[in-house]
Image (cartoon, coloured by chain):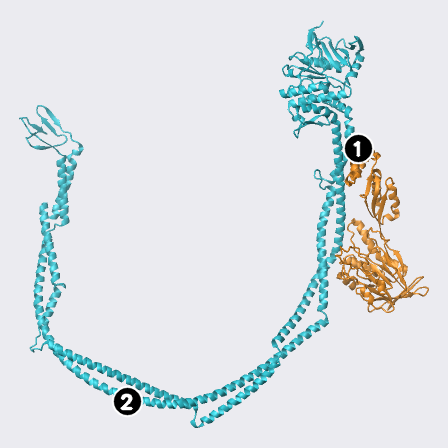
Chain colours: A cyan, B orange
C-alpha cells in the first residue's frame, strides 16, 4: 500500500480548514514545513485513519479534535496494486468510514466493511506495523522511552511476529522452554558435581577425590609400614639364619679348638723363648766370667809391667833430685855474695844522703830569710791598698748619689725643662714697640716698651683711644695643665735632688763623679790586694810567720857544694841500684832452683808412689809369674765355657717357634671368639627388637589394612573417574545445547540481519548488530572488534540504528506481502552532518522500492535527502 | 594311643594319635571291595584375612566371613567324601602377618573338626619367611593340624607319605619340587604338594630375558608321585590325571573359574591312577555377566534372562559388562533395568562404556522434533558416531532428560 494524498478537515489546528498534502509519490517524499505547521497532526491523522476505528474516541482521537470542536474528517488516498482508493473517516461526530475506488468513483466499503478493507490491506490492527515502521517525533529507539508495559509488550510481540513470520517462531527455533528445562536440568546435575567455571570437583565427586587423596596418604603410610614390616621380617629371617650358624655346635667347637690351639701354641712358644732366654743368660754369664778372667790376667800383666816401669822411674827421679839439690846450693851461695855487695852500696849512698840533707838545710835557711824580706814588703803594699780602699769606701758612703738617682734627676730636670718649653711655647707673648706716647695696658697694667708679656685667655689689653682687646685663646693654649704638669715635674726634680743630696744637677753630677772615682779607686785597691795577696792578707801573714820560723836555723859547717854531693850521690845510687838488680837476679835464680828442687822432689815422690802402687798391684815379685800363668789358664777355661754355652743357645734358637706369630694367632683366635660371641649377642638383641616390632605390626594387621585401603582407594578412584566422565558429558551436552541455541538465534535474526547489514555498513564499516532475543531489539553494536551495548551508544547512533532497523523491518514486511510506507516525523534530530548524509543514502537505498514519507522542520538539513516535495495546501473548509 | 574309627557305607578309616608327639595318623582303609585306599581332600588358597577393600563394609564382612566358613565347608566335604586328611597347598593366610584373631579362629575351626587331619603348607603369601604365622601355628596348633614346613618326606598315614614343597619366600626363584625326584619313601603312596605356577604368564621381556621360576608340569612323573596337588591358581585346573590345581574353596574374583571348591582324591595304592572328584564349597558366587548386544535387540530381556535366579542373588557378586551396539532407548532401558536389579545382589556393578550407541531419527525425535535441542542432539549423535564417547554419553544424557521432562 502506498499513500498518495492526505486531507485533514477540522483536525486539531486545522479547525474549520482543510489541509491537504497531495502528490505523495513512490520513493522518498519530504514534507518540510516550519514548526507549528502541523506535521505531527498529519502523522497522527494518517495513524488514526489506518489504525483507529471510526467509532474510536480514545485519547488519540480526542487529541485530533480542534479547539472549536466539531467533526473530524480525514481522507487518505492510498494506492493498492495500482488502484487508488480514498479512505475517509469521520471521528467523534457523524462517525463514518468509507472506502472509495477513485478509478471508478464508487464507494466499495462503508463503516465496518471499510474497517475490514483497511485491515486486509494494512495488517492486524493490534500487531500493526505502525510502531515498527513509523517514527513519531521524539522517539529515539524502536519504542517510546516512556512506553507503558502493555505498549512495550505489544511492540515486542509485533517484532517477534514479524521475524517469526520469516524465520519461524523463536521458541521453536531456539528450543524455547524445552531447551531451558533441559539446560537447567543439565546444569543442576553439573552443579551437583562440579563448580562453575573451572568445573572443579564438588559434592560427591569432590568427596570421591578427597577421599581418594586421604586414602592415598593412608596407603602410602601403610605401604611404608608394610615395607618396614617386610624389612623387619626379612632382617629377622637373616638374623635367624645367622644365629643358626652362630649357634652351630660344630662351629662353636671349632672356634674353641682354634682358641685352645692358639693358646697352647703361644704357651709353647713362650716356654721355648724362656729357654732361649735362660741359655742366653748362661752365655752372657760365661762371657762375663771370661771377660773377668781376661781382665784379671791383663790386669796382673799390666801391673807387673807398671811395677817395673815405676822402678825405673824412681831411679830416674832420684838422679834428677840430686841434680836439683846441687844447683840450689850453688844459687844460694851466689845470692849471698850479691847481698853483701848491695849492703855496701847502700851504706855509701846513705852517707852521701846525710851530707846532702845537711847541705840542703843550710840552703833552706838562707832562702827563708830572703822570703821573709819579700813577704814583709808585700805585706806593706797590701796594707796600703787596704787603706786606699777604706778611704774610697768612706767617700762612697758619704756620697749617696747614685747613677740611678742622677738619671732620675736628669729626667726630672729634662721634664721640667720640657714643660717649661711647652709653657713657653704655648704662651702667647706680646712685646710693645711704641712709636709714640700711647701706651698699652694689659689687665690694667701698662705694657712697657719691649717688655714681653704672656697673654692668657681673657687678658684685656687696653688701647687708649681705641678700646679694649679681649684675648680669647684655645684650650690647648691654656696654662693650667702645663702648670700642673710643671709643678709635678718640679716636685719630682726636687725629690731627685734630695736623693742626690744636691741642689743642682751639676752638683749632683760632681758628687756622682767623686763617688765614681772613689769606686774606681776601691776597685783598684781591691785588685792590687788580690794580686799581691791572692790568698788574702791573713795567708800572707801566715807565710811570713812560717818563713820567719824557717829562717831561725843556721849551720856553721861549710858544706861541700851541693852539686858535688849530688854527683857523688848519683854514682852511689847507681851502684846501689846495680847491686840490687844483681841481688834480684840471684834471688830469682835461687827461686827457680827451689822450684826445680821441688819438682824433683815431687817427681821422686810420685815415682815412688807409682812404684808402690804398681808393686801393690803386681803383688809379691817372686809369685808374679806364677799368678800370671794361673790367670791365663782361667781365661782359657772361661773361653771354653762360653763356646759351650753358645752352642747350646744356637741349638735352642734353631728350632724356636715364632712367638710373635703365636701371639698374633692367639690374638686372632681370641678376637674371632669374642666377635662370634658379640655377634651372637647382637643378633639376639636385634632379633628381640625386630620381634617386638613385628609383633606390634602383626597385631595391628597392617597388611590387611593396607590391602583394604588399596581396594577402597581403587574404588574411589574408579568412582572419581566416573564422575569426571559424567561431568565431561554434562559439559559437552551443555556446550552442544548452548551452541545449538546460539546458532538458532543467529538463524532467527538472519533475515533482519540480511536487510540491516548493507544499511548499517553505509554508516559503519564492518559493523553488526547483536539482537536481544527477549525484546527483539538491537542489543549491541559490534564494530571495530568491540561490542557496545545499545543504550551506551550516542543518541545519534541509537537514532540511526533504530531508523535503519525500521527500514529492515519494512523490507521484511514486504517479503511477507505487506508493502507499507515508512513515515518519519522529525527523525534524525541527533545526527551530525556526515551521518545524516549517510542516512539519506540509506533512505534512498531503501526508497528504491519502498515508499518513505519524511516530515521535517529542518529544511536546510534535509535538503540533501533529495526526494519528492508534495504539494501542501490549506484552505478554509467549505 | 587314641584310636577312632569312622565308618560309612563305603569306607573304614582308622585314626590314632601318638600321645607323646601328638601327631595323628590314620590307617589306610579298605573299601568295600577290599581295595586299599587313601582318601584326602586337596584344597588351597583360602586366603584367610583377605580384606576385599574395594567393596563396601558390609560386603567385605560377608566375603571375609565366607572365607572363614570355608574351613567348615572343606571339613564337610571331606567327611562326605570319606577323606581323612585335608591337604592345604599353600596361601591359607592372605598376609605374612595376619592378625592373631585370623590365625586363632582358623585354628579353632580346624580344632573343631578334630576328626580330620589338616596339613598346612606355606604358599607364596604365607611363605616360610612369614615366621609369625608358623611360629604361632607351631606353638598353638592342635594335634589334628600338621605343619609341612620342610622339604622332606612326611608320613601321612601308614602307607602314605607327603612330599611337600613349602614356599620359602614370596618369589622363591626356583623349582621347589626338585627335591622330590630323589626322595625315597619305600612302598608308600607318594603324594606331592606344591604351590606356584607351572606356566609363567609373564613375557620373557618382563622376566628380564630369562625363564620364570616355574614348576615342572611333569614333576609327578619325574618324582614318581601318585598325586601332585598344586595351589596358587584360584581356579580348578586339571594339569594331568594325577596333577591338579584345586582352586580356592571360596571365589574371590570375577575371573571365569569353575565354581569354587576342592578336590576329593582317592588313591588305591602306589602307582594307581587317582580318582579325583570336584566338590563345590563356595558360599558366594562371583559372576561376571557379559552382555553382547545387537542393535535392535531387547537388551533388557537379554539382561533378565542372563541374571541368576532370584534366590541366588543375595549371595552373588555381580559384574555386568555390556558390549555391542544398542539404540538410545534401549541403552536407557538397559541402564534403568540394571539399576533396578542391583539391590538384589550382595554387590553389583556395571560397565556400559563398551556398548556403542546407535541412533535413528525417531530417537532424536523423542528428544525434540526440531529447533536447537534437535540440532544439539544431531550434533552429538554425529560426534558419537565418529567414536566420540563423551558425545555419546552426552547424547545419552540428553535423551534421558528429554524423556524425563516430557
Examine the rendering and report whether any part of residue A67 can be seen.
Answer: no
Picture disc at residue B374: 1
Callouts 1 and 2 close, C-beta under 8 Å: no
The crowd level at tag 2 (other Cα within 10 Å; few <14, some 14-19, many 20+) is few
Q: Residue furthest top?
A: A878
Q: Residue furthest left?
A: A437
| Image position of A535 (left or right of B329) | left
| Image position of A293 (left or right of A449) | right
Mark 1 to mark 2 CA distance (whole Å):
174 Å
Q: For this rendering, which residue is in front, B56 or A491? A: B56
Dot 2 lies on which element? Answer: helix
Rendering quarter of residue A173: top right
Rendering quarter of residue A311: bottom left
* Chain designation of label 2: A
Examine the rendering and report whether any part of residue A335 can be seen.
Answer: yes
* Chain designation of label 1: B
Whether residue A674 is situated above or below residue A815 in the rendered picture: below
Whether residue A655 is situated above or below residue A133 in the rendered picture: below
For the N terminus of chain A, give its image quadrant: top right
**Residue at x 9% of width, y 45% of height:** A504
Whether residue B342 is situated above or below residue A464 in the rendered picture: below
Same subunit, labels 1 and 2: the answer reads no
Rendering quarter of residue A545: bottom left
Number of marks present in the image shown = 2
The crowd level at tag 1 (other Cα within 10 Å; few <14, some 14-19, many 20+) is many
Whether residue A779 is situated above or below residue B244 in the rendered picture: above
| Image position of A706 (left or right of B109) | left
Q: Residue furthest bottom?
A: A622
The x, y position of residue A473, in whole percent, is 16, 31
Residue that label 2 marks: A326
Dot 1 lies on which element? Answer: helix
The x, y position of residue B315, in whole percent, is 85, 50
Amino acid at each position: 500500500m502506498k499513500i498518495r494524498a492526505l486531507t485533514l478537515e477540522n483536525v486539531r489546528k486545522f479547525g474549520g480548514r482543510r489541509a491537504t498534502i497531495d502528490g505523495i509519490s513512490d520513493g522518498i517524499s519530504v514534507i518540510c514545513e516550519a514548526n507549528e505547521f502541523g506535521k505531527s497532526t498529519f502523522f497522527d491523522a494518517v495513524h488514526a485513519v489506518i489504525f483507529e476505528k471510526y467509532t474510536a474516541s480514545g485519547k488519540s482521537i480526542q487529541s485530533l479534535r480542534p479547539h472549536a470542536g466539531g467533526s473530524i474528517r480525514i481522507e487518505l488516498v492510498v494506492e493498492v496494486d495500482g488502484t487508488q482508493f480514498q479512505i475517509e473517516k469521520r471521528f467523534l461526530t457523524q462517525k463514518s468510514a468509507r472506502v472509495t475506488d477513485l478509478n471508478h468513483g464508487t464507494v466499495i466499503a462503508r463503516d465496518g466493511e471499510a474497517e475490514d478493507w483497511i485491515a486486509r490491506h494494512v495488517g492486524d490492527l493490534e500487531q500493526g506495523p505502525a510502531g515498527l515502521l513509523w517514527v513519531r517525533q521524539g522517539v529515539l529507539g524502536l519504542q517510546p522511552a516512556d512506553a507503558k508495559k502493555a505498549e512495550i509488550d505489544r511492540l515486542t510481540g509485533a517484532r517477534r511476529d514479524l521475524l517469526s513470520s520469516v524465520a519461524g517462531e523463536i521458541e521453536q527455533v531456539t528450543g524455547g522452554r524445552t531447551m531451558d528445562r533441559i539446560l537447567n536440568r543439565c546444569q543442576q546435575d553439573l552443579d551437583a558435581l562440579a563448580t562453575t567455571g573451572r568445573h572443579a570437583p564438588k559434592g560427591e565427586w569432590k568427596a570421591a577425590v578427597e577421599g581418594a587423596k586421604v586414602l592415598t596418604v593412608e596407603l602410602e603410610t601403610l605401604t611404608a609400614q608394610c615395607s618396614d614390616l617386610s624389612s623387619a621380617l626379612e632382617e629377622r629371617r637373616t638374623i635367624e639364619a645367622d644365629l643358626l650358624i652362630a649357634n652351630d655346635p660344630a662351629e662353636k667347637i671349632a672356634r674353641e679348638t682354634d682358641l685352645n690351639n692358639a693358646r697352647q701354641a703361644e704357651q709353647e712358644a713362650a716356654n721355648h723363648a724362656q729357654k732361649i732366654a735362660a741359655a742366653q743368660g748362661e752365655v752372657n754369664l760365661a762371657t762375663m766370667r771370661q771377660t773377668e778372667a781376661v781382665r784379671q790376667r791383663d790386669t796382673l800383666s799390666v801391673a807387673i809391667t807398671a811395677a817395673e816401669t815405676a822402678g825405673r822411674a824412681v831411679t830416674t827421679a832420684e838422679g834428677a833430685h840430686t841434680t836439683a839439690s846441687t844447683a840450689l846450693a850453688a844459687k844460694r851461695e851466689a845470692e849471698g855474695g850479691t847481698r853483701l855487695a848491695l849492703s855496701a852500696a847502700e851504706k855509701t849512698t846513705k852517707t852521701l844522703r846525710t851530707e846532702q840533707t845537711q847541705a840542703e838545710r843550710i840552703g833552706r835557711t838562707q832562702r827563708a830569710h830572703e822570703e821573709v824580706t819579700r813577704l814583709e814588703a808585700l805585706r806593706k803594699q797590701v796594707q796600703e791598698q787596704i787603706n786606699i780602699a777604706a778611704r774610697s769606701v768612706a767617700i762612697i758612703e758619704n756620697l749617696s748619689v747614685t747613677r740611678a738617682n742622677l738619671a732620675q734627676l736628669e729626667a726630672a730636670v729634662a721634664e721640667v725643662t720640657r714643660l717649661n718649653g711647652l709653657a713657653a711655647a704655648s704662651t702667647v707673648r706680646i712685646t710693645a714697640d711704641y712709636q709714640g706716647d700711647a701706651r698699652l695696658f694689659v689687665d690694667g697694667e701698662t705694657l712697657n716698651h719691649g717688655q714681653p708679656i704672656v697673654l692668657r685667655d681673657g687678658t684685656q689689653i687696653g688701647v687708649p683711644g681705641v678700646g679694649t682687646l679681649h684675648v680669647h685663646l684655645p684650650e690647648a693654649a691654656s696654662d693650667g695643665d702645663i702648670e700642673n704638669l710643671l709643678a709635678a715635674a718640679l716636685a719630682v726634680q726636687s725629690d731627685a735632688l734630695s736623693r742626690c743630696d744636691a741642689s743642682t744637677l751639676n752638683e749632683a753630677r760632681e758628687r756622682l763623679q767623686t763617688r765614681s772615682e772613689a769606686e774606681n779607686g776601691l776597685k783598684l785597691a781591691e785588685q792590687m790586694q788580690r794580686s799581691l795577696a791572692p790568698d788574702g792578707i791573713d795567708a800572707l801573714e801566715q807565710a811570713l810567720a812560717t818563713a820567719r820560723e824557717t829562717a831561725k836555723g843556721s849551720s856553721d859547717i861549710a858544706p861541700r857544694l851541693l852539686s858535688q854531693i849530688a854527683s857523688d850521690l848519683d854514682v852511689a845510687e847507681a851502684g846501689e841500684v846495680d847491686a840490687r838488680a844483681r841481688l834480684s837476679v840471684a834471688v830469682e835464680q835461687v827461686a827457680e832452683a827451689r822450684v826445680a828442687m821441688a819438682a824433683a822432689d815431687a817427681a821422686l815422690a810420685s815415682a815412688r808412689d807409682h812404684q808402690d802402687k804398681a808393686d801393690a798391684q803386681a803383688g809379691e815379685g817372686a809369685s808374679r809369674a806364677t799368678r800370671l800363668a794361673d790367670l791365663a789358664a782361667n781365661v782359657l777355661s772361661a773361653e771354653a765355657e762360653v763356646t759351650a754355652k753358645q752352642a747350646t743357645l744356637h741349638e735352642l734358637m734353631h728350632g724356636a717357634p715364632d712367638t710373635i706369630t703365636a701371639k698374633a694367632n692367639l690374638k686372632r683366635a681370641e678376637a674371632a671368639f669374642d666377635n662370634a660371641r658379640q655377634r651372637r649377642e647382637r643378633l639376639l638383641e636385634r632379633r628381640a627388637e625386630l620381634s617386638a616390632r613385628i609383633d606390634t605390626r602383626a597385631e595391628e594387621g597392617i597388611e590387611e589394612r593396607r590391602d583394604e585401603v588399596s581396594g577402597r582407594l581403587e574404588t574411589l578412584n574408579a568412582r572419581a573417574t566416573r564422575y569426571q566422565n559424567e561431568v565431561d558429558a554434562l559439559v559437552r551436552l551443555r556446550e552442544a545445547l548452548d551452541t545449538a541455541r546460539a546458532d538458532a538465534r543467529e538463524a532467527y535474526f538472519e533475515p533482519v540481519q540480511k536487510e540491516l547489514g548493507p544499511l548499517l555498513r553505509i554508516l559503519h564499516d564492518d559493523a553488526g548488530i547483536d539482537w536481544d532475543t527477549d525484546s527483539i531489539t538491537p542489543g549491541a553494536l559490534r564494530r571495530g572488534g568491540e561490542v557496545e551495548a545499545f543504550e551506551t551508544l550516542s543518541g545519534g547512533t541509537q537514532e540511526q540504528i533504530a531508523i535503519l532497523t525500521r527500514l529492515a523491518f519494512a523490507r521484511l514486511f514486504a517479503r511477507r506481502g505487506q508493502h507499507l510506507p515508512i513515515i518519519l516525523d522529525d527523525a534524525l534530530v541527533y545526527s551530525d552532518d556526515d551521518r545524516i548524509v549517510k542516512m539519506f543514502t540509506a533512505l534512498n537505498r531503501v526508497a528504491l522500492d519502498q515508499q518513505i514519507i519524511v516530515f521535517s522542520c529542518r529544511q536546510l538539513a534535509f535538503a540533501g535527502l533529495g526526494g519528492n516535495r508534495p504539494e501542501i495546501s490549506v484552505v478554509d473548509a467549505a | 594311643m587314641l584310636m577312632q574309627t569312622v565308618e560309612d557305607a563305603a569306607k573304614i578309616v582308622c585314626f590314632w594319635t601318638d600321645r607323646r608327639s601328638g601327631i595323628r595318623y590314620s590307617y589306610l582303609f579298605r573299601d568295600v571291595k577290599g581295595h586299599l585306599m587313601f582318601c584326602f581332600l586337596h584344597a588351597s588358597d583360602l586366603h584367610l584375612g583377605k580384606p576385599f577393600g574395594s567393596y563396601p563394609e558390609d560386603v567385605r564382612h560377608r566375603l571375609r566371613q565366607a572365607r572363614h566358613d570355608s574351613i567348615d565347608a572343606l571339613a564337610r566335604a571331606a567327611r562326605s567324601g570319606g577323606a581323612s586328611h585335608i591337604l592345604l597347598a599353600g596361601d591359607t593366610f592372605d598376609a605374612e602377618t595376619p592378625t592373631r584373631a585370623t590365625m586363632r579362629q582358623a585354628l579353632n575351626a580346624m580344632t573343631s573338626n578334630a576328626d580330620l587331619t589338616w596339613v598346612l603348607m606355606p604358599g607364596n603369601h604365607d611363605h616360610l619367611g612369614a615366621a609369625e604365622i608358623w611360629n604361632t601355628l607351631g606353638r598353638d596348633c592342635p594335634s589334628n593340624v600338621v605343619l609341612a614346613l620342610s622339604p622332606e618326606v612326611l608320613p601321612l598315614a601308614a602307607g602314605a607319605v607327603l612330599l611337600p614343597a613349602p614356599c620359602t619366600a614370596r618369589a622363591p626363584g626356583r623349582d621347589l619340587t626338585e627335591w622330590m625326584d630323589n626322595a625315597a619313601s619305600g612302598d608308600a603312596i607318594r603324594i606331592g604338594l606344591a604351590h606356584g605356577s607351572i606356566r609363567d604368564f609373564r613375557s620373557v621381556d618382563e622376566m628380564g630375558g630369562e625363564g620364570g621360576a616355574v614348576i615342572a608340569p611333569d614333576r609327578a612323573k619325574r618324582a614318581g608321585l601318585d598325586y601332585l596337588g598344586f595351589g596358587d591358581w584360584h581356579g580348578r585346573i586339571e594339569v594331568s590325571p594325577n596333577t591338579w590345581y584345586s582352586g580356592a574353596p571360596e571365589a574371590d574374583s570375577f575371573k571365569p573359574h569353575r565354581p569354587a571348591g576342592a578336590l576329593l582324591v582317592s588313591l588305591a595304592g602306589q602307582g594307581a591312577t587317582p580318582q579325583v572328584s570336584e566338590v563345590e564349597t563356595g558360599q558366594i558366587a562371583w559372576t561376571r555377566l557379559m552382555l553382547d548386544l545387537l542393535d535392535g535387540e531387547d537388551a533388557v530381556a537379554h539382561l533378565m534372562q542372563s541374571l541368576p535366579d532370584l534366590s541366588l542373588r543375595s549371595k552373588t557378586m555381580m559384574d555386568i559388562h555390556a558390549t555391542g551396539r544398542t539404540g538410545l532407548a534401549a541403552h536407557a532401558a538397559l541402564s534403568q533395568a540394571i539399576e533396578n536389579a542391583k539391590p538384589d545382589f550382595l554387590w553389583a556393578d556395571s560397565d556400559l562404556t563398551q556398548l556403542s550407541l546407535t541412533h535413528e531419527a525417531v530417537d532424536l525425535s523423542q528428544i525434540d522434533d526440531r529447533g536447537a535441542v534437535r540440532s544439539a542432539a544431531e550434533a552429538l549423535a554425529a560426534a558419537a558416531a565418529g567414536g566420540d564417547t563423551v558425545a555419546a554419553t552426552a547424547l545419552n544424557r540428553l535423551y534421558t532428560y528429554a524423556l524425563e521432562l516430557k
